[in-house]
Image (cartoon, coloured by chain):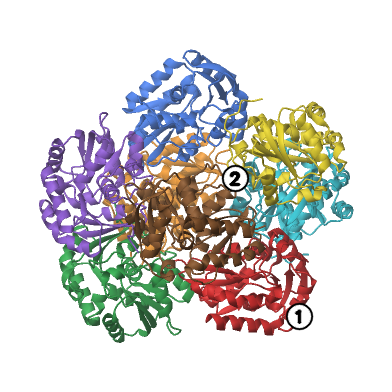
Chain colours: A blue, B orange, C purple, D green, E cyan, F yellow, G red, H brown
Amino acid sequence: MIGWRARIGVLLPPDNAVLEVEANRLPLPGVSFNIARMFPVELGELPQDAPRHIPSLKECRVNFIVYACAASSFMFGPGSNDELERKIRKLSGLDAVTATSSMVFSLKALGIRKVALATPYWKELDEKLLTYFAAGDIEVVRMKSLQLDNWEAMNNQTPDAVYRLVRRADHPEAEGILILSTNLPTFEVLQVLEDDLGKPVVSTNQGMMWTACRKLGIRDGIPGFGSLWQRSSWSGQ
Amino acid sequence: MIGWRARIGVLLPPDNAVLEVEANRLPLPGVSFNIARMFPVELGELPQDAPRHIPSLKECRVNFIVYACAASSFMFGPGSNDELERKIRKLSGLDAVTATSSMVFSLKALGIRKVALATPYWKELDEKLLTYFAAGDIEVVRMKSLQLDNWEAMNNQTPDAVYRLVRRADHPEAEGILILSTNLPTFEVLQVLEDDLGKPVVSTNQGMMWTACRKLGIRDGIPGFGSLWQRSSWSGQ
Amino acid sequence: MIGWRARIGVLLPPDNAVLEVEANRLPLPGVSFNIARMFPVELGELPQDAPRHIPSLKECRVNFIVYACAASSFMFGPGSNDELERKIRKLSGLDAVTATSSMVFSLKALGIRKVALATPYWKELDEKLLTYFAAGDIEVVRMKSLQLDNWEAMNNQTPDAVYRLVRRADHPEAEGILILSTNLPTFEVLQVLEDDLGKPVVSTNQGMMWTACRKLGIRDGIPGFGSLWQRSSWSGQ
Amino acid sequence: MIGWRARIGVLLPPDNAVLEVEANRLPLPGVSFNIARMFPVELGELPQDAPRHIPSLKECRVNFIVYACAASSFMFGPGSNDELERKIRKLSGLDAVTATSSMVFSLKALGIRKVALATPYWKELDEKLLTYFAAGDIEVVRMKSLQLDNWEAMNNQTPDAVYRLVRRADHPEAEGILILSTNLPTFEVLQVLEDDLGKPVVSTNQGMMWTACRKLGIRDGIPGFGSLWQRSSWSGQ
Amino acid sequence: MIGWRARIGVLLPPDNAVLEVEANRLPLPGVSFNIARMFPVELGELPQDAPRHIPSLKECRVNFIVYACAASSFMFGPGSNDELERKIRKLSGLDAVTATSSMVFSLKALGIRKVALATPYWKELDEKLLTYFAAGDIEVVRMKSLQLDNWEAMNNQTPDAVYRLVRRADHPEAEGILILSTNLPTFEVLQVLEDDLGKPVVSTNQGMMWTACRKLGIRDGIPGFGSLWQRSSWSGQ
Amino acid sequence: MIGWRARIGVLLPPDNAVLEVEANRLPLPGVSFNIARMFPVELGELPQDAPRHIPSLKECRVNFIVYACAASSFMFGPGSNDELERKIRKLSGLDAVTATSSMVFSLKALGIRKVALATPYWKELDEKLLTYFAAGDIEVVRMKSLQLDNWEAMNNQTPDAVYRLVRRADHPEAEGILILSTNLPTFEVLQVLEDDLGKPVVSTNQGMMWTACRKLGIRDGIPGFGSLWQRSSWSGQ
Amino acid sequence: MIGWRARIGVLLPPDNAVLEVEANRLPLPGVSFNIARMFPVELGELPQDAPRHIPSLKECRVNFIVYACAASSFMFGPGSNDELERKIRKLSGLDAVTATSSMVFSLKALGIRKVALATPYWKELDEKLLTYFAAGDIEVVRMKSLQLDNWEAMNNQTPDAVYRLVRRADHPEAEGILILSTNLPTFEVLQVLEDDLGKPVVSTNQGMMWTACRKLGIRDGIPGFGSLWQRSSWSGQ
Amino acid sequence: MIGWRARIGVLLPPDNAVLEVEANRLPLPGVSFNIARMFPVELGELPQDAPRHIPSLKECRVNFIVYACAASSFMFGPGSNDELERKIRKLSGLDAVTATSSMVFSLKALGIRKVALATPYWKELDEKLLTYFAAGDIEVVRMKSLQLDNWEAMNNQTPDAVYRLVRRADHPEAEGILILSTNLPTFEVLQVLEDDLGKPVVSTNQGMMWTACRKLGIRDGIPGFGSLWQRSSWSGQ
């Protein structure tokens, strides 16, 4: 039976052309990723669109749900993000995380208190992101952005553009780097970035998949996808 | 850029837990499969649900659309199937095929005139399937079914159950076998079935992915996924 | 010469369709497993049937004998199990272990004092198993069963069903898990279960093969078959 | 489920220490070999012992039975061999072959009319073997024997002793070589013998496994185990 | 000794960031590529700059020289190209080819009479290219260009951009495709393009390296770099 | 894009036939080596020739420059070497090292205070080399030379000649060995020399590539190229 | 048992440092090469020294003897060579070939009538070689020599020197090349030479090992050691 | 050049059919083993025969000599063994060891004070071996022998016979095992013996090759050939 360890449901923004390929690149025997593509509403309205796709995911018996949009889960602040997460859990009767929650969860699992951010976003979203972090206990020591202003461009980036962005974003005080957005392809450069920078690098897709797996009790160590996936110990939640 | 050769949009029935894993198992560099999960309506109403998910697929710039439900595309006969295909093409402005059309396309590409059918369905759907074929020029010489009456059971089958079903379905006059339904996992047994039976075996997922690729001008030969994927020549359409 | 390190004789219950395949999957150069299939008597009478197959095993010069039925060696309690083991040793003039003894031997080798049990059995056998453990110094903290009531069903299980059973059987206080029965295929999931649960998992076939090898002075470490086979030190007996 | 393509029951002479290792060396996914070890009666009485082990094999749901003793199936001539085969089929309700029948079947499948024989036997058995062939349409052009007079010695041979025996047994007129006895380890030298002699080499174990598979509709081509296993076409029976 | 089969001298335009990596990716034991980087003069003046770098190449004992700029060797027409080639031969005392000559040589080796062109150039260079071909016996049936207007952009292209350009450039009448410019990275997509288009694809770097090797009597067949490198026969010149 | 991590510009002496092959043998994804071959002037005049090739390297957007001649950077003493390095940095606006500086940098990174030297040079150059080291804080405890008197001979050496030279050059007090000259092929014997001598071995090409990478923040550990490349920690500049 | 297919005795000239390494590089399971090193007599007296080493080879039960000196077997002409071969056969009671006979045997097996010769010898030996061939039916169309005048130098050659010698020795009319002397290392360049020249290349060690194997009925095809070892058919002698 | 790290000369007893194959199985790049086969004199006279083969070894420029007969170097006691070693060193002008010296050297390198012996010899030789050890500071705690009385039998043993001999020879007080004789094939079972016994196992061929390499400053660690070859540190002599 396919998905015999777990089926992970994914609420995916409509433009996303990256997550499905990256998720299936992780060598996780018995784990499947099942996608529900949300409708092309305004970015800020995605949280409202999400609930109507939950019954579809339930139909294929998923065991967990990830809300795979970073921007729409951080743009209204921590309170709204928590609210969204609670709503998905309640409607689905399953455990769930948003992209934003899982990034914070991943950074904390790595013990990172000071972070540098690399984003594909335009100025407005970057500012909302900083606001989100300002409310928590992880300090942002630098942020660099590609300043792309449309989703198609974000979905067409190459990994080496991400490499150069992250090199620019790094800062001596940063204990780790966070690459924003489920639209950026990062899996091919995560390891080389960690080697070159000598510190952990977390990306939204990597952190979200890892959080889902760890919360499901799936604890494979996988080489080549950053130090997050190589951590062997986990004290659960 | 991910999906640099092509992005294939998939209109997926909500219960389906198999297609996403099988599609991503095909070693097709530069090809991505982008899923839109349809809503949990009645089986016969899926063709009506399909159109509202097309804009979502357009958002991530797919180059082709497959309608990945066999039963709801053959149950109303060839006319309705053609109509559905035309509607998707028109609404999307892209080339498209249904699961049913792609199965017929695959059988014809292999030169199969007499076929044996293996299905997971219950009696009523099996009869509709026979009716569909009766209207065309491919003769059905035998049909065997698992007689499963719910979609969850169909999605939880193991490949060796499929192997035994197909062995029972084979018939000396059959020039090839067709395994129905996008819910059955077949990729692990397609090759061994062909070796044991000495004739081509087509499954819905295999035939649908192959048809989409060939129509997009993607002509990789892939060993281990049945004779369909090993065919090197193609004269297009 | 085949079996140049050791030939391990196996007294196998007649229904067993699993052990021969699992035993031969272990990469143990120079070790052979030689089977004698017992007669289809009642479960409780297998210990009486065993002796008449010992001369057959002696004919091919085995160096050790395993009595490969768990249920019939634990169902009458520790005393009967010891008696059976002694009888096989006496009749064969060789060292020997029963499935039940080897499971206890394996758990102790791993230092497990509190165990969770996963079985394929029906209620009656499960109760006898608990009675057996109650008489010793290993505490059972949870037990979950498939509640199968015929041997054919037990021999036709897939590894992923075993995975889910063991996930259900785990308990926070358990220092390890024991999967009962030589009929369940466990070799494909032992390692992933240990990774996910973060504790050792022993299955009857695994523990029995390991016990036989260690008692014969065969001490290969084998990756991928659970922590038992990866242990490098052994202080013998 | 283990043995999902087929389970092949084996009635094995008690002394045999070779067949179980060789059978499991064949890379045949989904095929299992299930052993019943016969009792240590006189060689000539093995056919009488065989029936009482058939119910044991039926218990694990085998799909086919091989009678894995060459000598006791040829020593009484073709009529007795056919009778034995019929008896096993009748008692089991399954298709079956003896070691002797499968050797003849294999030689004919390879189109061999003139054969050289290599045996481990003593004079008396060699003569009975010649008598057996004299009654059929395959001509024996040479025979060489190890002249071993006990079964333990036969089961302890090394492959290179078999290599040298077969080199001595070859004859310019022989279209192929047949190596007798299920006790001789031949799998490691079959291919090199064929390369050196430039003609097919059949051994009892190889031919018996191949015959069972082909009659079950299992038609894998396997490199490295002689030309018999590399034949891709088969017209059945 | 490094370069024991041959040392190939390369006169490289100063901006080129691609050829050195691609040339060294070819698995050619005993062959080295030795670079002389020309001075940053105007494109049209590169042929005048080339001679002053020939003595440098002679110092490391190259056996052959390639003039690795396509545009400056075709922009003045066939006569000037031949003149440039003759001058390099005379000054160096070695055999030599220009990028342009080697492309024509490669197309003819593949028997291509009608070609489609894919270029990174701007309009003016594209027109000069068409003029060059108009003077010979290879017919251009289509041309598509990236219309890049600076060399840095050309040197920063990714292989998938080249893939899409070539797909656009193909034409049913074209017997093959020629990708222009030593600045475009093509080695990662040459094979997949040939598979998808069903016809040979030649790129400047591929054709130039191949021509140099063939003229030096180095005739390795290399899989994965297009049909040119897989050709086993060569009747020299 | 080729060279997406970094493009390293190389000012190469004209006779050099070794560096281009060795540099491209290092498995450094995303790093390219871009060559400018200097003019065939007298050895001592190479530092004067270097500047006129810097604009060529700038054209292909290199991120760093190495001056790849050992002799001409040490023959005039530390002051001139520093002056040369400063000049290249100033003219290029990029960070840069000479072969000589990078050797010293590498030895110090390995904590070597006493070194044995192996050179291909004739007496005069050897003496200048000793003079250079005499001015610094690394003590030379032995020096052995091939006493070759022409550059062609130096470029045609085989790795095993280097092995024997280094074995002769080793001295019990040496904490490491330095192999001089960018003309000697050393990559195939660096590791075996370290294993046999039990101490680090640095060669000019190895040390120069490593220094460039480390200064660019490229910190891959590469097995098989000496202990320098296996060092994981680096504390910058 | 080591050498279970065959043990090949080798009468080796004392200076030879090459044959033992090359012979053991051939992947020939069950074949061993057993060396007797002849005494350091004059080249012309080696045939007289050979007999006293035959009893040593007989002690380890060799099945065949090769006289592994080319020069001393051709320098006195075909009659003396035949006489030497007969003497070794008579004294040993085994089949035997000289280096010279096996080279002729190999050329004829490849159907070569016109040959080019590459030798390491000085003028006098080259002339004797030509005289030898003049007496037979293979025509020498060109000969090139390294003109080495001592055996130590011959034994210290590198494969790339052999490559360049053979490239010089080739001639358009030559149907194949013969590389003389058991002292030259040729196994690393045989295949690349055949690829570059487009014709078979035979070397003394290659041809001698092949002849011994074929005469012993050992017919492995081995890729990478020239077309001689890839020939699958052999009609014996 | 073959043997570029070292050429090791071997004075080999005439019957030996094992050492040449085992020595060449060691993956030691640049190291060659050059054999001189001694004459078939009485065992006790081999030390007298040895000197006349030293000039042959000198002809191929060996760097070291091993006297590869255990029995004839221990049978006359430590004094004679030392004398033989001195004589070979003096006559050759090279460093040298006998089989016996190298075994003692290897045991001491492993820190073994109490040893168990496994030999192929007959009683008389076994007693002389014990006498030899009695004179030194390594205590023999057990000895088991194959009691073979002719050299041909010794040279035809299989590795699994050696395995069983060593298992019998082991003793709880033994800190390691020594397998005698250069005629026994041990390389295939050394590692499995060490794993099963949990202590180092030295064989004559293994210890002799290792001693020669270590004395030549060749310090490769090689997995799979016993703990001796895996030792990384060496303090020389």
Which of the two marks, 2 or 1, is nearer to us in this view?
2
| Figure quadrant of the N terminus of chain A | top left
Can the viewer see residue G236? no
Q: Chain of mark 1?
A: G
Secondary element at image label 2: helix
Asked which quadrant contains residue C112, the reply is top left
In this rendering, the answer to whether G115 lies above or below B204 is below
Can the viewer see residue F230? yes
Q: CA distance from mark 2 to mark 1?
A: 49 Å
In this rendering, the answer to whether C36 lies above or below B67 is below
Which is more toward the observer, D172 or H72?
A: H72
Left/right of residue E223 with respect to residue B189 in the rendered view: right
Picture disc at residue G131: 1
Secondary element at image label 1: helix
Marks 2 & 1, CB-CB < 8 Å contact: no
Picture disc at residue F196: 2
**Looking at the picture, do discs 2 and 1 lie on one chain?**
no
| Figure quadrant of the C terminus of chain A | top left
Q: Chain of mark 2?
A: F
Q: What is the x, y in percent for residue F121?
A: 79, 44
Left/right of residue H207 with respect to residue E21 in the rendered view: left
Left/right of residue B183 with respect to residue B88 in the rendered view: left
Q: What is the x, y in percent for residue D199?
A: 45, 76
Question: Which amino acid does the dot numbered 2 rest on?
Answer: Asp
Question: Which amino acid does the dot numbered 1 rest on?
Answer: Thr
Q: How crowded is the residue under tag 1: few (<14 C-alpha within 10 Å), some, or many (20+)?
A: some
Picture disc at residue F39: none
Asked which quadrant contains residue E123, the reply is top right
Left/right of residue G112 with respect to residue F15 in the rendered view: left
